[in-house]
Amino acid sequence: MHIEILDVVVRVVLVLATGFIFGIVFMTYLRLRSSKMLFISIGFGIFLVHALISIPELFVEEFRVVLTENVHLLIHLLALIFIALGILKD
């Protein structure tokens, strides 16, 4: 099992960036308490959980079997739907 250091660095940086964006959006939701920001923060929360789940894929081969490319696309689609609902909600 060969793990490239660049893969690990890129995944960790993506997790940190996603966590930073989720933190900003969630703090905005806590300040405004609107359903619009709730949907947007749920979407970014899904992205954060997905980023956290993608790190063990580098080390454990079984995660690659369970989380295929279609599952990754489905998770992204679900998060984007929540973000779009939040943006389009009036």
Image (spheres, rainbow, N blue to C red):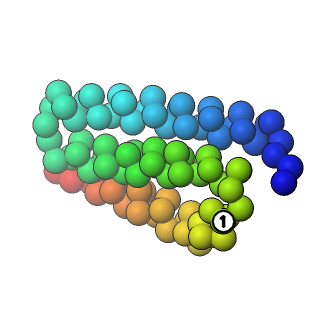
Query: Residue 47: where, in percent of width, then height?
Result: 46, 49
State the residue in front, 1 or 45.
1
Q: Is residue 26 visible?
A: yes
The answer to whether residue 69 is visible is: no
Residue extending farthest to the left is 33
Residue 69 is drawn in which quadrant?
Answer: bottom right
Residue 58 at x, y = what percent?
Answer: 71, 50
Horizontally, residue 76 falls left or right of residue 78, namely right
The residue that label 1 is drawn on is 62
Quarter-of-image position of residue 32: top left
Type of the residue with mark 1: Glu
Q: Residue at x 23, y 45 (%)?
A: 38
**Residue in front for this viewpoint, 54 or 80:** 54
| Residue 16 sits above or below residue 69 on the image | above
Q: How many marks?
A: 1
Identity of the residue drawn at 59% across and 70% down: 66
Q: Position of residue 29 (x, y in %)?
A: 22, 35
- The answer to whether residue 72 is left or right of residue 44 is right
Q: Could you tell me which residue is drawn at 33 percent across and 56 percent down? A: 82
Quarter in which the N terminus is drawn: bottom right
Q: Residues within 10 Å of mark 1 (few under 14, many from 20)?
A: few
Nearest to the observer: residue 26 or residue 32: 26
In the depicted structure, whether residue 3 falls above or below residue 10: below
Task: Identify the element where label 1 is drawn.
Answer: helix
